Amino acid sequence: MARTGFVSSALFLRHDTGPGHPERAARLVALDRRLAQSGLVEELERLEAQPCDPEFLALAHDRRHVESVARAIHAGARVLDEGDTRVSADSFRAASAAAGGAISAVEKVLAGEWRRAFVAARPPGHHAERALAMGFCLFNNVAIAARYAQRFLGLERVAILDFDVHHGNGTQHIFEEDASVFYASLHQYPLYPGTGAAGERGKGMGAGTTRNCPQAPGAGDAQWISALEDFVLPEFEQFKPQLLLLSAGFDAHERDPLAQTKLTTDAYRRITQMCTQFADAHCQGRVVSLLEGGYDLDALAESVEAHVQSLARP
Ligand SMILES: [Zn+2]
């Protein structure tokens, strides 16, 4: 059986968002500890993420954005663009390694070395717009991974499922006019960043390859799972992706402090199983999952364990 990859890096701990920030290094420490305690880590093949060539960041971003993030951090900035995106001296390297880790995972999966992979990276990526850092995100890791798979590995169609509790505005906007990448999102609505209404279905050539499933605050497992089953997966099936990428945020958990959605840990197991079953049937089992949000340390660690277990043991 092809292995499941686990990509992380000590560099991710050096992205320092300052005191009191929810998107903190302790998230990865908690998740690592949990995977080690459960023994799950022994079933995974670990790979150290490396910073990537800035050219790859430009697959999803304006070059000027990449340069201005680098310049600002080099000049000692502690905050970028929107006020909630805090950075430190090592943040560019960490963010570059988050994208680099996603690229490595996609390469390994498409080479058949791994069947699936989980990338435990920070900073997260799905709020980063083509030319703007926002919502704790510098570069859009999932968008870079999708573009890399198309540009360098010959894929035509990539599907992205984003189940972070927040809508992935950046990812949607990067692909909304592009019929070759299907972006689907389950998220709480209304909530930050304010995008992701059901009527947003893509534009121009990309009309129909965006699918938003906004869920009311207080919604739980049943609503989220049926949205995935009834709306997203049937459309993915018609789209026929060659790779499924996940923007895996765990902040829809009932214990998460940033939203009012009430998913249990078991919902993450179910959602993951539905994704792996879809991938097994339609895209050679290929799933690459990238960590986005999740801010209650215990809920995050527990949910990631359920998620990775379902990726590794279908
Ligand atoms: Zn989130």
Image (cartoon, grey):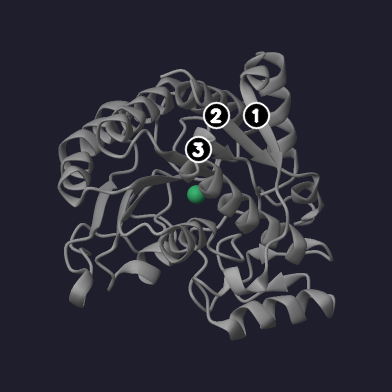
Q: CA distance from mark 1 to mark 2?
A: 6 Å
Residue of label 1: 45
Tell whether label 2 touches label 1 (CB within 8 Å).
yes
Q: Quadrant of the C terminus?
A: top left
Q: Is residue 96 above or below residue 80?
A: above
Identify the residue at image location x=74%, y=49%. Answer: 12
Residue 129 percent across, percent down from the top left:
48, 71
* Labels 3 and 1 touching (C-beta < 8 A): no
Does residue 140 appear left or right of residue 54 in this picture?
Answer: left
Nearer to me, 248 or 178: 178
| 104 up-or-down from 312: above or below | below
Q: CA distance from mark 3 to mark 2?
A: 20 Å
Going from N to C along the chain, the mark reached first, 3 or 1, is 1
The image quadrant that residue 54 belongs to is bottom right
Q: Residues within 10 Å of mark 3 (few under 14, many from 20)?
A: many
The quadrant where residue 99 appears: bottom right
Q: Is residue 192 above or below residue 231?
A: below
Query: Which residue was labeled with disc 2?
Result: 4
Which residue lies under the disc numbered 3? Answer: 250
> Percent from the top left, x then y, of residue 310?
45, 22
Q: Residue at point 49% right, 58% down?
A: 126
Density class for disc 2 (Cα within 10 Å; few <14, some 14-19, many ≥20) is many
Q: Secondary structure at mark 2?
A: strand
Q: Secondary structure at mark 3?
A: loop
> Which residue corresponds to the image point at 61% horizontal and 59% vertical from the top-left?
136
